[in-house]
Image (tube, grey):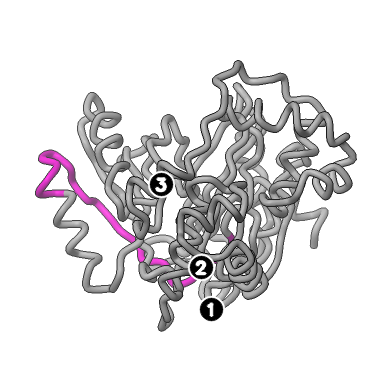
Amino acid sequence: MRDSVTLPEVDLKLIHALQVNARASWSAIAHTLDVDPATAARRWARLESSGDAWVAAYPLREPAHAGAIVEVCCTAGRAMAVAAKLADDPHCMNLDITTGARDLMLTVTTRSAAQLSEYLLHRFDGLEGVRTVTGHLTFRVHTNGGHWRMGVLTPRQERTLTKTYAAVPAPVAGPPEWAMAVALGQNGRRAVTDLAASSDVSEATIRRRLPALLGSGQLILRCEVARERSGYPVGVWYFLRVAAAKADEVGATIGRLPQVRLCATVDGPANLIVQAWVPSRERITNFESLLCRSLPGVEVIDRSVMLRTAKRVGRLIGEDGRAVGITSTDIRLPIPRTSEQD
């Protein structure tokens, strides 16, 4: 946990606008924020170049996709080295270095249950510095970072930016759809002409299929911000236990709390895992108390505070919390094996 300086209010509003509609035009954003379009574009370029904010894309959400939250315990002094190895994996979406009973927390996304099993059973084989691995299968994700908002725009401003796509059945994810998703994982605001060139898909195909992917929810774009610059610099993982019959109901309620970045129903003694961002270390126990007071029957059985984030949705994160590099989000790639890398 490092000292932080919150971004200026105008930048926080710009980030919030792109969280609502990641591909909104600069003119639409400028109208909502009451700034000049050139000013909005210039400030975003500065945020991107500094690594303070970025727009990425999740891998395509296919019917058979499977995910897990993974705890890794490392031998003394090896957490950073292990994190550096795992951060290159396309299947590792997010990776935090934490305090407490685990050294690393990963969120893993795969195309199928079989691929997820391969990751959990074999990815850590022979990886120097790994002591134990505990995987939690995600049965239901109630909220994730793609739903989280900065909380600086009014509901009216959000409505002016909200893009409504026609509800359509999820298209079959063929090579063009995957190529678009992988290219948008590098930069979710790529212009159609640039997207066509980088994905080797025609502009006409992109204009036709991209709205269908977004409208069906098969493709999700996500505007991110450096946690240390967001005004919520302290990240915490909470492990909760609740009656199985109430897990989804409680999870949905927790997922609506503004501090919550992730809430998922999982297997294991802690059947709800929650990630929250709070303004200060003093708020860690305050938020925990809020959970227990407002949700009778919820037991907090453990928590871990983020010391650093090593990766967030395809971005490698530096020591100061800013994005410093980009990795592939193409989960069609084979699961890495340690013997092939070392």
Q: Which label's residue is closer to the chain start, 3 or 2?
A: 3
Q: Position of residue 230 (x, y in %)?
A: 42, 68
The residue that label 1 is drawn on is 320
**What's drawn in magenta, residue-wise?**
292-311
- Residue ID at (42%, 81%): 5
Q: Which label's residue is closer to the chain start, 3 or 1?
A: 3
Give the label on residue 226, or none.
2
Query: Dot 2 lies on which element?
Result: loop
- State whether residue 102 appears in this view: yes
- State whether residue 82 appears in this view: no
Judge by depth and name the residue closer to the eye, 40 or 308.
40
Q: Residues within 10 Å of mark 2 (few under 14, many from 20)?
A: many
Query: Dot 1 lies on which element?
Result: loop
Which image quadrant: the N terminus?
A: bottom left
Give the main secondary structure, helix, strand or loop, of the magenta stretch: strand
Judge by depth and name the residue closer to the eye, 38 or 305.
38
Amino acid found under the numbered disc labelled 1: Asp
The residue that label 3 is drawn on is 158
Q: CA distance from mark 3 to mark 1?
A: 30 Å
Q: Is residue 42 left or right of residue 14?
A: right
Give the label on residue 222, or none.
none
